[in-house]
Image (tube, rainbow, N blue to C red):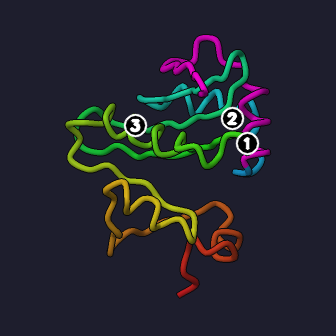
Amino acid sequence: MHSFSWVYDQASIDWQELSRLYRIAPLGNKAADDLNIVFSNSKFKCFVYKKQKLIGVGRALADGLDCSYICDVAIHPEYQGMGLGRKIINQLVELSFGHKKIILYANPGKEGFYKKLGFKQMNTAMAIFSNEQQAIDVGLLSST
């Protein structure tokens, strides 16, 4: 049985370790300094440890009333498939309780996972990405 510890603040986060977790999860290259900024600006955050090793993470940008946006959920490959991603999402949803809407965008092919957690497909979501072509290539944006 695995015992995990959950941390909800970033006071003792090793940003380089977090950056490595995103690379191997894999969720792409996210620079340590950039992660410090985005987590600092996020109202809710979850860091999951096995002993002293960071194995899971997620955050939500939230305004305290109207909108909470869940993003950057990542699980270390050795711990994927154990329900940690679901637990992080559920914890961020619980922390976001009282917001009029809780939003996330799913990576293509993962929509079913989020539907099981209570999320519904949005019909009117629109986005501007800094690297639009890459977002189109990976299926996040429609080219039309």
* Quadrant hosting residue 92: top left
Which label sits in the foreground, 2 or 3? 3
Kind of residue at disc 2: Asp
Magenta highlight on residue 106: no
Q: Nearer the viewer, mark 2 or mark 1?
A: 1
**Image vertical order of residue 54 relative to residue 89, above or below:** above
Q: Are marks 2 and 1 in contact (CB under 8 Å)?
A: yes
Q: Which mark is residue 92?
A: 3
Mark 3 falls on what kind of element?
A: helix
Q: In the rendering, at what x and y percent does residue 113 appear? A: 47, 60
Q: Is residue 80 above or below residue 107?
A: above
Query: Sequence order check: which comes first, mark 2 or mark 3?
Result: 2
Q: Quadrant of the N terminus?
A: top right
Which residue type does callout 1 highlight?
Lys
Q: In terms of image quadrants, where is residue 76?
A: top right
Label 1 Cα crowd, 10 Å radius (few <14 / some 14-19 / many 20+): some
From the image, tell me which residue sits under label 2.
Answer: 34
Residue ID at (56%, 30%): 39
Q: CA distance from mark 2 to mark 3?
A: 21 Å
Q: Position of residue 17 (x, y in %)?
A: 77, 27
Mark 1 vs 3, N-terminal side: 1
Reading the image, the residue beneath label 1 is: 30
Answer whether residue 11 is magenta in the image. Answer: yes
Residue 122 is left or right of residue 8, and the answer is left
The residue range painted magenta reads 1-25
Q: Residues within 10 Å of mark 3 (few under 14, many from 20)?
A: many
Residue in view at x 32 percent, y 75 percent: 123
Q: Nearer the viewer, residue 82 or 65?
A: 82
